Image (cartoon, grey):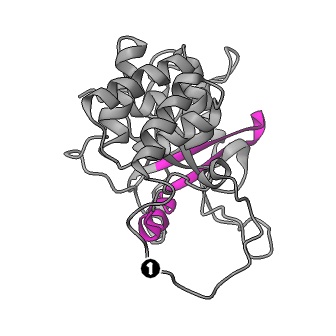
Amino acid sequence: MNLSGAELRKLVNAIISAYSTKEDLAMMIQFELGENLDAIAGGANLNQLVFNLITNWAVPRGKILPLIIAAYKYTPDNPELKEFYESVVIKKRFIVDSPVKNPDFGPDINWRGETDEIQLQSWLKPEPNLLDVGFLKGASASVCRIEIPSRNIMGTGVLITENKVLTNYHIFKYNEEDDIKTNALNAILKFGCLTSDNGLETQGKSFQLDRQNPILCFSKTEDLDYVLLQVESKIAQATEIKPARWDSHKLPIEKKGIIVLQHPEGDSMKLSISQDGIIGVYK
């Protein structure tokens, strides 16, 4: 959908009229489009934010029409949005009575769903992300559950070299009374803890940390919150467990979403497709 300069200005003003705060706009974007506003647009003020949302995100990705529909559907009583929708969208015939007819496929059906135009527009959803199954399978081989039975603590770690695991510092130093080295020596690392066909968790393979030098380096919770662990040497014999693949020359992309393989609350491995975004990349 192409907008003239005047129509673009009119749309910016209409959205600002309907969503007078960043928080209101973020709620609409999250609820209607399934996107995190902070991850897809920024600006020093609301005018810049809305302008960037339209010109830097919606237009390049072909999402200007879903954005307009979402904004109007979420706040249908706003007069400026309603006027824009009726005078620009309907007038341009982008939704109904389009001069471009798509070919019909399949048999005639007796439609029993919504017939109201606005209700029908709710079917326009954001395209789902496509995740490579082979990549996820390989990535899952590097993820482990870290258990400290004596403290009833569980967390997630990732194998980054043949015998080194990266995880959070707060797992081993949950409170002031915890001794980080004692917890490390008591820790059990379990790889391959997945949900099986019968709904139960697979046993996976378990390892301890190196008895002489379990902790290689760390940064406290209030700083970078990480600890690098050294796993016992027998992990090298487990050929199905592989370090995570990464390329130091390929940095994360700012404002991209985050996809995480993890053991939430000690459960079997789960995939989390988060709407949180990368706010900055620092070398």
Residue type at tag 1: Pro
Magenta region:
131-158
From the image, which quarter does the C terminus lie in? top left
Q: Which residue is mark 1?
A: 103
Query: Could you tell whether 113 is left or right of 235 in the image?
Result: right
Residue 123 appears in which quarter of the rendering? bottom right
Packing grade of label 1 (10 A; few <14, some 14-19, many >=20) is: few
Depicted 152 relative to depicted 138: above or below: above
Residue 169: x and y in percent read 54, 28
Residue at the farthest top position: 45
Residue 170 appears in which quarter of the rendering? top right
Q: Is residue 166 visible?
A: no
Of residues 34 and 104, which is closer to you in this image? Answer: 104
283 in magenta: no
Residue 230: x and y in percent read 45, 44
Residue 281: x and y in percent read 30, 30
Secondary structure under tag 1 reads: loop
Query: Could you tell whether 262 is left or right of 281 in the image?
Result: right
Residue 185: x and y in percent read 61, 39
